[in-house]
Image: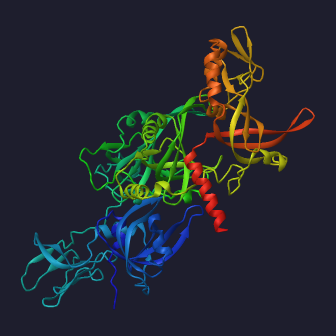
Amino acid sequence: MPVNLTPNAIAAINGGDVNSKPLVQVMDIKLIGSTQERYRFLISDSVSTQHAMLATQLNDRVKSGRVKKGSVVQLIDYICSTVQNRKIIVVLNMETIILDCEPIGNPKMFTESESTTQKATPNSNIEHPVRVNNYNTPIRGSFNPQNPGTFNTQNPGSFSNQNPGSFTTSNSGTFRASNPSTFWAPNSGNNVQGFRPTVQPPYQPPPNYRNHGPILKNEAPARIIPIAALNPYQGRWAIKARVTAKGDLRRYNNARGDGKVFSFDLLDSDGGEIRVTCFNAVVDRFYDIIEVGRVYLISKGSLKPAQKNFNHLKNEWEIFLEATSTVDLCPEEDASIPRQQFSFRPISEIENAENNSILDVIGIVISVNPSVPILRKNGMETQRRILNLKDTSGKSVELTLWGDFCNKEGQKLQEMVDVGFFPVLAVKAGKVNDFNGKTIGTISSTQLFINPDFPEARDLREWFDQGGKNAATVSITREIMAGGSKNEIRKTVSQIKSEGLGRAEKPDWVTVRAFITFIKSDNFCYTACPLMIGDRQCNKKVTQAGNRWQCDRCNQEFDECDYRYLLQAQIQDQTGLTWVTAFQESGEEILGCPAKELYMLKYELQDDIRFGEIIRSRVFNQYLFRLKIKEELYGDEQRVKITVIKAEQLNYSSESRYLLDLISKSQRK
C-alpha cells in the first residue's frame, strides 16, 4: 500500500508552522553527545530532508526499537530553532505510524531559499486572477516557481515561457501576439493585455539590509509547554507549574564578590519537575512573591545543565531566571497539578544508596531525642535533633533534623511520641550520609509531612497498628559504620584490649553498649579560637592576655573565645572498663548542654551545686557508644586512643528488638 507523506512539511515547519501534525519518514538516526545521550534524526517529507533533535524524554523510543531508520512517524509537538546559525527541528512528541518502510521519494537536503519560495507559492489547484481587458479573470491552475513563465490549468489551457506570446486551451485554440504582453482572442476580438499571475517571486533585499532599521519582535504570548519538553534549543516558552519547595536565601562570597541566591522547585500537571534558581537582583524581584503550594506561569528563563550534586530532581536541566523573565501568579486553583510528588524508597534499600544521594522515605517515628545545640565548622551555632524511623521492610534508620526542623516538626514529633503515639512521617528530599553509618539528614529543600493523607501513609499506619509495632527491626544506621564495614561490629569493653583493636594501620570502628561510671570535672573543656581559616574554624587552644584572648596559630587577638568539650570519661560494661575521650559534638550528647554554659556555671557563677548535679545526672546512664580506636604516639610511647564519635542514650525498646533479631538469626543457623 503506497504511503503518502505530508507534502512540503519540512518547508512549513521551517516557515513557523507548529500546529499541523505532519507525517514524515526517519531517514537516519545518530546518537550524539558523550556525557548526555541525545538522538539526531534525519527526517523527510519525500521531497526535502532536515535534521531534527529528539527530546531526551523520547530516548526510550529509540532504545526500545519503537522508532528506527525507515519508520514513518507523525510529529505531534515540535518547534524549529536556530542553533549555530542553522535551523534544526526539535521533536517534543511523536507517534510511530509505520515501523518499517522503504525510502519514500528522492528527497534532498532542505535549504533556506526553498523555505522562502515555498511560503510565497501555493501548492496546487488554486485560482489565480489573470488581467484581461482590465478585469481580473480567475483561472484555476498552478504556478511553477522553478519555471515562472508557466501557468498550467486543469482544463482551460496553459501559458508557456518558451513561447511567451501564446496561451493555449483545449477548447479555444492557440493565440499568439507579437508583443509577449498582449494576447488576441479571435473569437471575441478582445484585447488581452498584461497577463501576469498575482503571485510574484519573493522580494530579495539588498545585502546591507541589516543596518536599515530595527526588526519588529514577536510579542505574542509564549506557548505553554510541559516541563518535560523544555530544552535549550527553544527560543520562547512558558510553563505552568506549582511550587513544591522553596529554599532559603543564601549569601556567598567568591572571586567576583558578594552575592545572594535562592531556588525553588516546580511540578506540573504531567508530573514533570524542574528547579528554578535566581541570583542577586533577580532574587529581589521574585523571592517574596514565590510561595510553596501556589501555581505560577513562568517564561523567558534560560536553561542550563542541572548540578546533580545539589539538585535531586529528575530533570537534566535547570531554569535560571533573568532580568527579562516573568513570573505570574495563577490565582485560580488548578486541580490538575498535584501538590506534591513522592518517589519513596524502602528503608532496606537505603543501605545500598550512595553517599550524599537525595531520596524520599516514609516511616513510623519510633523514638525522638532532645534537641541539642551544635557549632558548625563555619562557627555558626545550630540545632540538631535525632529520631528513628521504621517501615515494613524490617529496617529502621536514623533521621537527623537540623536547624528550624528541630523546633517545628521535631518538637511536635517528640510531644506525640512522649504520650505514646507513633506518627507517620514522610520525608521529601532527605540526604543520605554514611559517615557514621547510613543515616538521613535534612537539607534546605527537605520537606517533612506528619501523618499525611495519601495511600502510602494509610498502608503504613494499618501495618503498624495491626502488629508492625512489635515487629523486630534492624537499624541500618548501626549496621554500616564509617570504617566501611557492611555489618555492625558490636564489641565488649574487654574485647578492645584482648583483640588488639586500633593497632592496625587504619582505625577500628566499633559499637559498645556501656554505662558511664566516671566523668572528670576538671578541664572538661578548653578555650578555642573562633576565627575562620577558609571555610573552617581554627579551634586551636587560646590563652588569655588581660581582657582579650590570643591565638598563637592565627597570631591575632579577640574579645571573646569559643568553648569546646574535651571530656574524659570512664565507661564500663559486664566485661570491664576503659577510658574514652569525647570532643565537642559527642560531649554535648553526653552532658546535654553546650560547653560554654557548663564553663560559665563552674568558673564564672561558681555554682558548684548545680554543676555537680549535671555531672552526676549523667553517671550510670547506659549508652550505645560509637567508638574510633586508633594507636597514636605520645612522646616516645604508643598508646591506644579511644574516641567517642557518637553517644546515643540506650533505647531499651529498639535494643530489645535488636537482641531478639540476633537470637532468631542464631536459631536459623
Camera-side residue of 631 and 326: 631
Indicate left or right for 419 with 153 as reference.
right
Q: Is residue 555 visible?
A: yes
In the rendered image, which quarter contains the N terminus? bottom left
Q: Is residue 305 visible?
A: no
Residue that sits furthest to the left in the current view: 188
Residue 549 position by quadrant: top right
| Percent coordinates x, y for residue 313 in the rendering | 48, 53
The residue depicted at 47 percent of the width and 71 percent of the height is 60
| Percent coordinates x, y for residue 202 in the rendering | 31, 64
Tell me: residue 33, above or below residue 188. Answer: above
Residue that sits furthest to the right in the current view: 636
The residue depicted at 45 percent of the width and 67 percent of the height is 54
Tell me: residue 438, above or below residue 605. Answer: below
| Percent coordinates x, y for residue 402 in the rendering | 53, 38
Residue 88 position by quadrant: bottom left
Colouring scheme applied when the structure was drawn:
rainbow
Tell me: residue 550, above or below residue 422. Answer: above
| Percent coordinates x, y for residue 193 in the rendering | 16, 73
Tell me: residue 613, above or below residue 1. Answer: above
The residue depicted at 37 percent of the width and 34 percent of the height is 288
Indicate left or right for 464 with 507 as reference.
left
Residue that sits furthest to the top in the current view: 546
The residue depicted at 61 percent of the width and 32 percent of the height is 376
In the rendered image, which quarter contains the C terminus? bottom right
